[in-house]
Amino acid sequence: MPANKKNVLTTGQVAKICNVAPRTVSKWFDSGQLPGYRIPGSRDRRIPLDQLVRFMRANGIPLNGLDAGATRVLIVDHDAQTCEAICRAVARDAGYEVSGASSAFEAGMLAQSLQPQAIVVDLDLPGVTTRGLSRAVRSSPEVASARLIGIGHVLGDNRGQALLQDGFDAYLPKPFEVRRLIELIEAAPGNSGAHA
């Protein structure tokens, strides 16, 4: 197992790995078959990767789905402190592999090497148009299928709809709850228009 894989998974990630419904994973957890823990103050469950591997082996579930569990997210925000705070919160709450960039150039370099499944972009990034950004992402083989989510302080429904027409998958006005951003990252492909 590569060292960079996260070692704690959500029930949704476990469901994808095991090719079952999230409700099934919750039943395994609640019955004590699949050891894990709840996040304090919430009903969210977390499953340590080593416990999942033991469970899968004991129940004859193929381990080849484990690669599906590593969700890579790239956060791009021109304010380095904001970027770092979002990265930390998303990594902590969702267990994703999260990287941050504070410029379009840095984001482009990271996107090529990380090949993230989701790219979250601050729409106030200097020198970048939303249409240009969307075209750059969609024309790059490494990230063309990534979910593209726009975030920004002045982001009403009219601007949001324009983003969707420009090729973004979703948008979220700042400030936002991290849980809402995670929901947009995890939304099914084609579920465009999701917003706060």
Image (tube, helix red, strand yellow):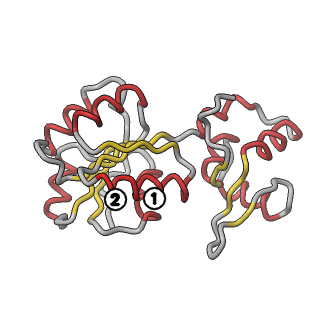
Graded by Cα atoms within 10 Å as few (under 14), some (14 to 19) or many (20 or more), the crowding at tag 1 reads: few
Q: Which mark is residue 49?
A: none
Residue found 63% across the figure and 76% down from its top: 41
Q: How many marks?
A: 2
- Residue 99 falls in image quadrant: top left
**Among all residues in the image, which is located at the extreme top?**
141
What amino acid does circle 1 point to? Glu
Residue found 19% across the figure and 39% down from its top: 133
**Among all residues in the image, which is located at the extreme front?**
81
What amino acid does circle 2 point to? Ala
Sequence-wise first label, 1 or 2? 1
Pinpoint residue 40: horizontal percent, then vertical percent: 66, 72
In this rendering, is residue 86 above or below 132?
below
Judging by the rendered image, the residue that carries numbered circle 1 is 183
The reply to whether the C-beta atoms of the residues labelled 1 and 2 are less than 8 Å apart is yes
The CA distance from mark 1 to mark 2 is 9 Å
Q: Quadrant of the C terminus?
A: bottom left
Answer left or right for 91 relative to 53. Answer: left
Pinpoint residue 194: horizontal percent, then vertical percent: 34, 59
Answer left or right for 12 relative to 85. Answer: right
Q: What secondary structure is marked by label 1?
A: helix
Residue found 68% across the figure and 57% down from its top: 46
Q: What secondary structure is marked by label 2?
A: loop
Q: Which of the two residues, 121 or 143, is positioned nearer the viewer here?
A: 121
Q: Which mark is residue 194?
A: 2
Graded by Cα atoms within 10 Å as few (under 14), some (14 to 19) or many (20 or more), the crowding at tag 2 reads: some
Q: Quadrant of the N terminus?
A: top right
Pinpoint residue 168: horizontal percent, then vertical percent: 26, 46
In this rendering, is residue 56 above or below 12?
above
Answer left or right for 58 relative to 61. Answer: right
